[in-house]
Image (cartoon, rainbow, N blue to C red):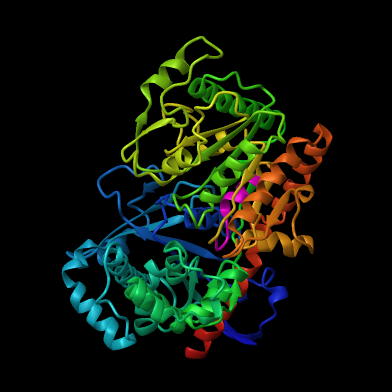
Amino acid sequence: MMLSGRGHTVFLNYNLIMKKNDLLPEYLFEISWEVCNKVGGIYTVVSTKARTLSDVEGLNAIYIGPDLWKEKENPLFTEDKRLWNGWRKSVCDDKLTVRCGYWEIPGRPKVVLVDYTGYMDDKDAIYGELWNDFGVDSLHGYGDYDDSMIFGYAVGKVIESFYNTNIKAGSNVVVQAHEWQSGGAALYLKKNLPAVGTIFTTHATSIGRSIASNGKPLYDYFDGYNGDQMAEELNVQSKQSVEKTTALNVDCFTTVSEITARECKQLVGRECDVILENGFEKDFVPVGKEFTARRKAARDARLRVARALTGDNIKDDAIIIGIGGRMEMRNKGIDMFLEAMARLNGCGEIDRDVVAFIDVPAWSGDAREDLVKRLKSDAQSWDTPLPNPYLTHNLNNFYDDAIACTIRSLCIDNRHGGNRVKVIYVPCYLKGNDGIFDKEYYDVLIGDDLCIYPSYYEPWGYTPLESAAFHIPTITTNLAGFGLWVNSVLGHEGKLADGVEVICRNDSNYFDAAEVITKTICIFAKLSEKEVLECRKKVVKLAEKALWKHFIKNYYKAYAVALEAAGKRK
């Protein structure tokens, strides 16, 4: 392929992209609802990648997100009114306000936060333009649709203004929009600023997630699904419309895994140009003596909470098992995790205590006062359980919470004395101030011996990658992008001895897959210390292959595809 770049034409050679800056954008605008807004996995993608991009010579990366904090102090953002001061004053008016500054993450990248709410009164006219220009159906939008679409429109105007004010004509400029929430910006720029190259990255298709979340068999009938038809059935027509329209109109369409690329082709109607796997930076993983100390502190905290709740004298050599993520019972495999624990509790093949922690934020209240009181006492063990001895925090919807209801229905609520398996539900965000652990998530995760994420719908899967990075043997599935990536790296289906076991999951083998998990735990429980150490070494080696320094080259490919298309328009 040929690419017009910095005043001359070059032949596109992906192997040289990392060496030749003239094949990279001079300006990169990366748009996400999760810039300076820690919500989920996309925050991790964009924020951890930022440091790698900051080291690329000649690349000016600017991150754009919604200004949701406004007058409140955002711990992730530091405003600098000197940054692009003249442009900032010129772009702000009675409809639009921006704040410029730095994202407080490694690399401290430059950020523009956009207050889009002034355009809300104009949404009907904006939606009319989108219909006339691209055929985007906004009639069925609800929930977060208006905020997302008007945010995208405002961001488009911000980038257009910045380009016309601060960027030299002819410069290579790429805009990457993450998820449908940013699709409106990509469409605005296609119409109003054709000189820039556009990339659209879907981390999970709206319709694919909706099919899975509504309990329908996504995989058994995959080739027969029509995305638009299913969107109408599931009442997500407007999200499907903007996602599909953006995918069909950008220069480069990308997603995060092979399994989601297949989904894009079938449900969105365009094959992906590049697969952008989700990497990470390992600087958040402690090493040496610090790793050992943090792991011991985490194990001590986990076991003390379990003893205080259950009143059982759980042994120090107990196997600590963990699952975390969003509250999506089926998609994240939380239901299968609990099924496996129930089977393990009754199998009679385990001769060690097992404590399974579910670190899944829900509609929770404060830490339980009776548990806090016990934890503050000098006692090391207790002989009576607390009420509901599986729950660390109060639940506002105790009788409707899906996890709590499943724990009770499977009779793994820790009330039956003598059972080897204890299940502990931690329904809050672990930010260091939860009142029970008072540790951040990673400082709790590090204490686990085995992590299990039996996902049904998981485009990538940061949680198993994170546990692997923390030296924890991990179980995932072949329906997770990370699981398929592990299989491709190993050249075979991942097993426990490889550090990551990738179990087969489909629409028909729920109980069989749960039984595989149960048997794998029994195998793990019988491993010698030497075998466990070898397993931990192998899982770290796998995680090392997912560092951004390995995955970033695919982003360079996407930039090149977008720049080639923009070069033709120039």
Residue 270 appears in the rendering: yes
Q: Which x, y percent locates residue 483? A: 66, 59
Numbered range of the magenta stretch: 458-467
Observer-nearest of 373 and 353: 353
Q: Magenta stretch: dominant SS?
A: helix
Query: Which quadrant of the structure image shows residue 467?
Result: top right
Is 545 placed above or below 251 here?
Answer: above
Question: What percent of the width, then of the height, locates residue 569?
Answer: 47, 89
Q: Position of residue 298 (x, y in %)?
A: 59, 29
Query: Residue 189 appears at what percent x and percent y?
Result: 38, 78
Q: Residue at x 39, y 73 (%)?
A: 183
Give the image quarter of residue 138.
bottom left
Quarter holding residue 164:
bottom left
Q: On screen, 519 above or below 272?
A: above
- Would you say residue 6 is visible in this rendering? no
For residue 120, above or below residue 537: below
Q: Nearer the viewer, residue 288 or 376?
A: 376
Q: Point out the image quarter for the N terminus.
A: bottom right
